[in-house]
Amino acid sequence: MALPHFVKLLASLALAAAAHAQTAAYVISDSTTGFILEQSAATRKLQVGSLTKIATAMVVLDWAAASKADLGQLATIPDRIAALGAAQGVGFQPGDQCSLRDLLYAALMQSDNAAAAALAEHVGHELGRNGEMSPADSFVAQMNALARHLGMLRTRFVNPHGLDHLERTVPYSTAEDLAKLTSYAMANSAFRFHVSQKERKIAITTATGETSSYLLRNTNELLGTAGIDGVKTGTTARAGQCVIISSGKPPETRAEAGQQIITPRRLNVIVLGSAARFDTAARLLQHGWQLYDSWAAAGRPMKGWKAPR
């Protein structure tokens, strides 16, 4: 092993060790294949807070694509947001109206719980037209159906926002399951665009008909650094500090059998229950690219590959 590479490897392992000490669970995965390059407690069931809103957004986007629904249509903030506690984020009030598109921005960028509730109520009404469940329950059922479809075997969603103190049934997921969800979400161009925005102005119409604008600011402090263009933060008392980041590099191009083979390069890092989520995620990403290079050099095997030590 060449000395410079050995020194880089030692530094990378030191970064990973420091990150491991600060987090309850993490996963570093290749976004294209879903292959896990490194993990710690990846299958441990944990509360994940507002990382839940990734699933919420994907149910909305999948529904819109399947039904050819216009994301510009208005949704009404439901009365039941009072149960979410004091107004946070945007400060939506019952009766306010906002487009589905802007509600997605509010839920994903600024982690607004009322926005997630409004999306669930509106889309759930469309999903459950012929059923006996409430719109919100229909929506959550679709979130869990998506989880099953993606093979998220240790995940249970109970609401669209991720608050874990409102129901008797506590929601949970794992770092491994969230890696699957993140790969699925980041393959969707609309989702990628939403989570890549640092700021976004949205329009709100109040119950009295007054229209105002609000400037959203993304809660992901790492956005725009080290190629990071997503994904989502999450925090509750039970979940602790959580974050998922995604970073891409220019694709690799190689000639093979007279053809040009283009291989995307994107890493997803899932961090749950961290004492310092952004520092931890940044360390793991740096370590992850070192692992990715070794994995790629080995031919990107999907089985049998072990991280160098």
Image (cartoon, rainbow, N blue to C red):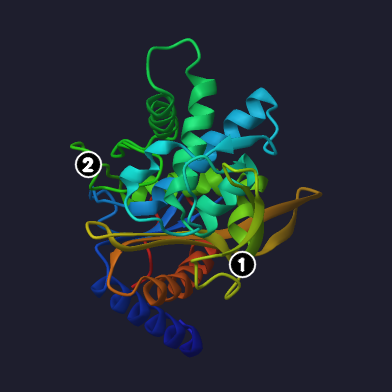
Q: Identify the residue under disc 1.
A: 198
Q: Position of residue 298 (x, y in %)?
A: 51, 60
Residue pictured at 49% horizontal, 83% vertical? 5
Q: Who is closer to the viewer here, 21 or 35?
A: 21
Q: Secondary structure at mark 2?
A: loop
Is 234 drawn above or below residue 225 in the view shown?
Answer: above
Question: Local crowd at mark 2 within 10 Å, few (<14), some, or many (≥20)?
Answer: some
Do the CB atoms of the residues marked 2 and 1 lie less than 8 Å apart? no
- Cα separation, mark 2 vs mark 1, equals 31 Å
Q: Who is closer to the viewer here, 162 or 280?
A: 162
Q: Identify the residue under disc 2.
A: 170
Question: Local crowd at mark 1 within 10 Å, few (<14), some, or many (≥20)?
Answer: some
Q: Position of residue 236 (x, y in %)?
A: 29, 58
Image quadrant occupied by the C terminus: bottom left
Instruction: Report which quarter residue 138 is drawn in.
Output: top left
Q: Position of residue 49 (x, y in %)?
A: 33, 53
Q: Secondary structure at mark 1?
A: loop
The answer to whether residue 303 shows anywhere in this view is no
Relative to 305, 75 lies left or right:
right
Relative to 194, 300 lies left or right:
left
Residue pictured at 51% horizontal, 38% vertical? 119
Q: Who is closer to the viewer here, 139 or 176?
A: 139
Which sits earlier in the primary sequence, circle 2 or circle 1? 2
Relative to 230, 281 lies left or right:
left
